[in-house]
Structures are given as C-alpha cells and as structure tokens.
Image (cartoon, grey):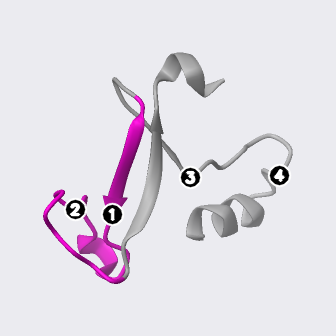
Amino acid sequence: MRLIENMSLNNLEGRVTCLNVGVGSEEGKVSFTSDMDTTNHVLASHEQNDHAINVRICTLETMF
C-alpha cells in the first residue's frame, strides 16, 4: 500500500503499474509475514502466521 501511495505522491500514475507479484525461476506462490514492520520475511512452509499474505510467483517470461 505504501508503494501505491508513494507513486501517487510523485504523480507517477499512468507511467507506473504496481503489481503484487514476485518473479522467480518457476511459477508458484510464497507467503510473507505482514505484521512485523521492517522485519517481515518469507515464511517457511512449516511456519504459521495469522497475518500472512500470499504472493503469486511467475517467471519473467510470463510476466508481460
């Protein structure tokens, strides 16, 4: 959300598109913590977090 706010403050709408997508070597998903401020991190598959967000992973070739 802060990225979108920053983009707007800098009048970059129309020139920048914000996507909640990760880029990796293969398609999939990854879970991140979202309640730890600057210490948010990727969750290992065995970790649980009630505030986790899931992010789709795509390859660079399929991104556009």
Whether the residues at callouts 1 and 2 have beta carbons within 8 Å, the answer is yes
Q: Earlier in the sequence, mark 3 or mark 4?
A: 4
Whether the residues at callouts 4 and 1 have beta carbons within 8 Å, the answer is no
Q: Position of residue 58 (x, y in %)?
A: 48, 32
Left or right of 62, for residue 16: right
Whether the residues at callouts 4 and 2 have beta carbons within 8 Å, the answer is no
Q: Which residue is mark 2?
A: 43
Residue at position x 37%, y 30% from top? Answer: 24
Between 44 and 3, which is closer to the camera in this rendering? 44
Residue 57 figure quarter: top left
* Callout count: 4
Depth check, mark 3 against mark 4: the one in front is 3
- The type of residue carrying mark 4 is Glu
User: Is residue 7 positioned above or below 52 on the image?
Assistant: above
Q: Position of residue 56 (x, y in %)?
A: 48, 46
- The type of residue carrying mark 1 is Phe
Residue 48 figure quarter: bottom left
Q: Which residue is mark 3?
A: 20
